[in-house]
Amino acid sequence: MLKAGFFLSRLAPALLAALLFQTAAFAAGPAQAAPLVLNTDGAPPHARPDGTGFEDRIVAEAFRRIGVPVKLVMLPSERCLQNANLGIDDGNYVRVAGLEKTYPNLIMVPEPVSEFVFTAFTRAPELKISSWADLRQRQVAIVNGWKIVERQLAGAPRLKTARDEEALFALLDKGHAEVVVAGLHAGREIIRVRGYQGVRALSPPLAVEPMHLYLNARHAALVPKLSEALRAMRRDGTLPRLTRAGLAGNAP
């Protein structure tokens, strides 16, 4: 009996410690899931390094509504698609519809995040552009990885590519391109911030396209939830509110 009492006395503190550990773990709840990594090549005001671009805000709010944490990162356009398709990152925003044909591991969220106004910018005072065909014989520069633009201008004899929209306008400023294709909002911001003189946006725009979020196929279960969240945001006015805030550079 003495031996049994001795072992019980030694065992009791260990049992108590285990019980306390389990109680604390239960009270703390399950561990926080690691955030999904979503990449973008968007230029301000679409996306910003601090996540205050208008598309940053919309995407972050949609994931917040479905209870999934996200981390937003900025990468070059083609690398964004490759990383998302290979599963290095969990998704990419925002893109035109139909990219799953080229990147089979990507699934498009059907409800659009935003619209993108593809616009030609130039310094040439007399230049008039009303369609993609008008650009084909021009010295034109585009962003590498913008699929809709690459398709429209494939085979153009004087086509140049650049890493991003900032680089496009640098080419235009140095006289290395006659015209560049950029987003209307981003182009205007770059002109303002860089102080480029004499650069103008041509009208009408080349195209206005709905833009979508894409997820790697392993997250297919999230697609209908995100589509419904975006629809709800459009209905309740959150989506236009976040768009205005992001365009203005204000806090949400």
Image (cartoon, rainbow, N blue to C red):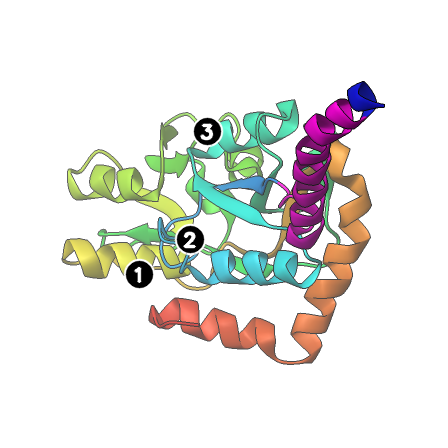
Q: Give the structural element (helix, strand or loop) at label 1.
A: helix
Residue ID for mark 3: 156
Q: Position of residue 26 (x, y in %)?
A: 72, 49
Q: Residue type at mark 1?
A: Arg
Occupied quadrant, residue 14? top right
| Amino acid at circle 2 | Ala
Quadrant in the picture for residue 158? top left
Percent position of residue 176, x then y: 22, 33
With 151 as the anchor, is 166 left or right in this view? Answer: left
Query: Is 58 above or below relative to 23?
Result: below
Query: Predominant secondary structure in magenta?
Result: helix
Magenta residues (range): 5-33
Asked whether, in this view, residue 154 is left or right of residue 193, the answer is right
Judging by the rendered image, the residue that carries numbered circle 2 is: 47
Q: Which label sits on residue 188?
A: 1
Mark 3 and mark 1 in contact (Cβ < 8 Å)?
no
Q: Secondary structure at mark 2?
A: loop
